[in-house]
Amino acid sequence: MAEENKIEKQLIEKAKNGDKTAISELVHRYSSRIYSLALRIMRNEEDAEDVLQETFIIMIRKIHTFSGRSSFYTWLYRVAANVALGKLRQKKHIDSKVSIYESEFETLRGSGLHNWPDQLDSRINDKQFRECLKQAMVDLPENHRAVFVLRDLENLSTRETADILNISEANVKVRLMRARLFLRDQLMHHLKCMEGIR
Amino acid sequence: MHGGHPVIQHTSHNQDLIKLLEEQLGKDVDARIIREVAEHMEECPDCRVFVDSVKQTIKLYRVTEKETSIPDNVSERLFKVLNLNR
């Protein structure tokens, strides 16, 4: 691990000096992770590719500002998350959607929870159920989705997520719980509609 | 929840829940309080459904939202845009 860190540090230093081979190696190392992150946040391949390209264009332009205070992937994730959220804001006017979400959150919270099915795993191969999972992520407001993706899917810590999104750790926790509840309630709503759960 | 109560046993069954509570409440909260909340949540049917439903939701997304490898054509276009050799 220490050796790996040393190699990466050397690559970054070379990349800062414009060494194309080193830049290329960094792109190889991180392009899959950044594409996956972008896809999870953007929810479509075309936009994910835009985010991917823009992230690495910024990496090349700004790598000289990387000071090493955070890990390189945290720095790169921050760039990618900002690019992705910027694009989503342009597309959907994020602020107005948040206020709608807050009221939805209050309405949906806990509704019919006592009927939550014990074993949902068995439905994973059900096409309609998978669509519902996807749609719930699309409906989740972007700034909450980003927290859910980074914390629960990318397994980053609260501190790292806060750093990447430039918000407080308390804010990460609040958004994460709201995101989890929103997704859970959307699934519950879907199951009720599909199967007439009372 | 303070004083007089026996110390809650740290069972392996509620380790996940304790971890989740520690994450959510932060490190400043007394470990004993966290254990007692976990114990309550284990025994209270409503809290149990609440916790299980949240855990299951996270699990479903972890299973269905697996990391996607970058497709070859996307990688090819990326290197082209960046003017780099693959």
Image (cartoon, grey):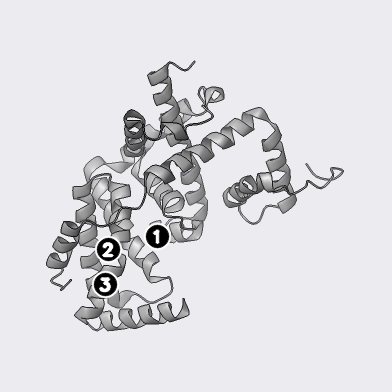
Specify which label sits upstream in the sequence, 2 or 1. 2
Give yes or no for contact between labels 2 and 1 (Cβ–Cβ under 8 Å). Answer: no
Marks 2, 3: nearer the viewer: 2
Task: Give the residue pinned by disc 1.
Answer: A164
Looking at the rendered structure, the secondary structure element under dot 1 is helix
Q: Chain of mark 3?
A: A
The structure residue drawn at horizontal position 34% and vertical position 74%, both measured from the top left corner, is A66
The structure residue drawn at horizontal position 69% and vertical position 41%, both measured from the top left corner, is B37
**Label 1 Cα crowd, 10 Å radius (few <14 / some 14-19 / many 20+):** many
From this view, report whether residue A120 is shown above or below residue A174.
above
Looking at the rendered structure, the secondary structure element under dot 3 is helix
Q: Position of residue A57 (x, y in %)?
A: 20, 66
**Would residue B19 be found to the left or right of residue A17 on screen?**
right
**Label 2 Cα crowd, 10 Å radius (few <14 / some 14-19 / many 20+):** many
Specify which label sits upstream in the sequence, 1 or 3. 3
Q: Residue flagged by tag 2: what amino acid is it? A: Ser
Specify which label sits upstream in the sequence, 2 or 3. 2
